[in-house]
Structure formats: C-alpha cells, structure tokens
Image (cartoon, helix red, strand yellow):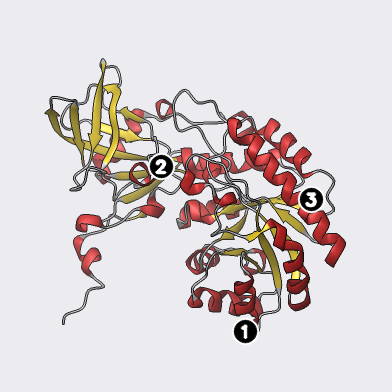
Amino acid sequence: MDASADSPPVRRLADWEHDRLGALADRYGTPLYVLDLARVRENYRRFAAAFPDAHVMYAAKAHTGRAVLETLLSVGADIECAARGELQRAIDAGADPDTLQYTAVNPPAADLDYAADLGADHPGLTITAGARDTFDRLADRGYNGRVAIRVNPGIGTGHHEKVATGQDAKFGIPAEQVTDAAADVSDRFDLVGLHAHVGSGVLQDDLDDHCRAIERVAELTREVEREVGDLEFLDIGGGFGVPYREDEPPLELEIVGERVRAAAGDLGAQLALEPGRYVVADAELILTRVNTIKEAPSSTVVGVDASLATLLRPAMFEAYHPIRNVTAPERESEPVSVGGPCCTSADVFCTDRPIARPEREDLLAIGNAGAYGYELASQFHSQPRPAEVAVDGGETSVVRRRETLDDVTRVEQDF
C-alpha cells in the first residue's frame, strides 16, 4: 500500500512530536534544521498520483541536500536543475545524467560549458533556455542535442511579486516570439519541448491565473507543432504551494490535476511538472532557543539564536512561517515579536503574533522551512550555518554538520 495515501495533505507544526524535537535540540544544539524524509517521500508520491500520465521531476533548487535528492531518486523521481551545481549534486546523489533537465536562466559561461560537455557524453540530457542568445551560446560550444524553449506567457501568480516569474521579462522568450524562435532552434538542435513556469506558492485561489497560463502555452505548443513537428513534452513547471498560515487549507490535488489537464486540453506532447516546494516545505522545520525576553513599549520582544542567516524568507519575501513554543505549548498565548541576533530590523520572524508565552531557554519551532530554507542560509555576521538532522521513522542522522568559525574563514587568504 502507498504510505502517502493515508498521509495528511499538509503537516502542521502541532503534528510534530514535541518530545522528540526537544531531545534533538538537546543533543545537536540550536539553531537546528530537522528534516523528515518519510514526509518527503509521502509528498512526492501524493503529487505524482495526482498526475498519473505526467512526467514528474523534482525541482532541486527547493532543497539540494543529498539526503533529499537520494530519497527522491529512491522512489523514482527525476530531477530538474537550474544551475551547474545542482546538476553536479544530482549526479553525485546517483541521478542518471541522461534523465536530467537543466533550465538555464542567464547561465554563466562555466555553467553552460559544464552542461554542453555533459550533454555530449549523455545525449538524454535536456537543456531548457529562455533566450535566443543562450541558444547561440550553446551552438558556439558545439552543442546540438536536446533542448526546450522556455516561454514567457505574460501571466504570473504566486505568493509574492518576486516569484511571479510568468510575467517577468527575465524568464523566457515572449509568447508572441516563440513560434519564430522554434523554427530557428529546431534547425540547429533537437527541439523536444516547451517550458513555462508561472510562479511559486500557488494555492487554490491562484489556480485561475495558473490555468490561464497553461491554456496559453498549450495552444503555443500546438502552434509550434504545426510549424516544426511533434514535441515530446510541455513542461508547465512547478509552483504548487503548501499553506504556510495555520488557517489556510491545503491544495486539493485531485481538483488541481483535473483543472491542469483541462487547461492543457488535447495534446500529443506529454505534460511535465516540476514540484519543489510541495515536496519539501512541510517536511522540515527549524528549532531555535530563546535567549532574551524584553518588554518594550510597543511589544514584547523575544530574542532567539536563529536569524535571517538561518532563514531568509521572512526578510526577503515578507514570508509567513508558523512558530510554536515546543517547550510549553499549553501556556496562555500573548502577542510577541520574535527576532534573531543580526544587526538589522529585517531580522524578525514575526511581529505581534500570538504564541504560547515564551520564556528564556524555551525551544521554539519555525515551520515549513524545507523549501528555500537551508538553500538561502548564509554566513552573515560571520555566523556558521546550522546543522541539519534527518529523521526517518525511528532513525536519526546528521546530514549536515554544524559549521564552525574555521569553516567560515577557510577560504580567506593572507595578503
């Protein structure tokens, strides 16, 4: 029986085993990323089941940790990569290079060199490009293999304007130029598909815009096929979200699947999808220890040892992440502002949010940290990046050790 069939469509912070979280914090210290590999498997299987006839690839940029990649490869997922490092990490985790898809966005020369060389040895690799200039650069490198054209449909959606890629000129060839571009590309390469990505964090209310974009690129696919011949696939990207706020309902994937198929219509090309956030977001959280309680005139300030260097999304996207007092969830809630040790007002995880009253040394959990959490972690303020532990049933493994200050300074040179 598929274990994902009975798993809930979203995992809330209250669903994590608090005693185990406390033991992990005591053993490995804080701040600490805690990753549940069973949940990663469940989420992927649930998503793939909603699109039984589609090619489902995991978008590695959401979380490139080896434990995640190896876990997904073990259940049959293919991998989509957006950078040279992701290609290399996928291969190191055991991916067959002939199954990889590389989506190049303004690729640096070293990235394009690596991808072209990889494609020469592994002709199954597919390179997706969103600019004619990128195709010219590939031709200059002698590459003539499998390619897809990234389309800009002019429609964007998602949780923030900075992720609404479907209407950002940075991404893709404008829809009205695609058929002409396809004629040129198909003369020089093996054109196998079209690609579009509308945005990130798509929930039920965003589906209308999302499906309008799919309708547009599906019609483009039919138009391109009339001009240059059959394509293998239409890749509609990822972007399907999870509810970060406690009162938001999860996506009804069965309905999503029906609507996506209806929007695509009658296609000879296979649909392809690239879930990233959906697979890993609620499979990981951050544990952080309270070190300061300050009663200020405007609010109660709770200082913790995690910071924007640990989790950048609140500062970068004004993103909401649920926070729970793991030590004493039964205490009466009061509005508090939770922030870290960085010397900037942006280093705040929440403002005036009701949380079970924190006290010094309490353990807090910050939820939905699996997507673009560790990926965006930094060494700002010379803070070593945190450890990451993976749980899988009753097993616990350190999958990333805690950095030291020596790690932070190792690349510096005497002068």
Percent coordinates x, y for residue 392 in the rendering: 47, 42
Three-letter residue code for mark 3: Glu
Query: Helix, strand, or loop for circle 3?
Result: helix
Residue 214 position by quadrant: top right
Near mark 1 (Cα within 10 A), the count class, few <14, some 14-19 or many ≥20, is: few
Pick whichever of labels 2 and 1 is earlier in the sequence.
1
The residue labelled by disc 3 is: 219
Query: Which residue type carries mark 2?
Result: Ala
Query: How far is mark 2 from mark 1, CA to CA?
Result: 41 Å
Type of residue at label 1? Asp
Q: Residues within 10 Å of mark 2 (few under 14, many from 20)?
A: many
Query: In percent of the image, x 26 and y 15: which residue is there?
Result: 332
Mark 2, residue position: 369
Local secondary structure at mark 2: loop
Residue corresponding to mark 1: 140
* Image spot of residue 126 (x, y percent): 67, 67
Q: Residues within 10 Å of mark 3 (few under 14, many from 20)?
A: some
10 up-or-down from 379: above or below: above
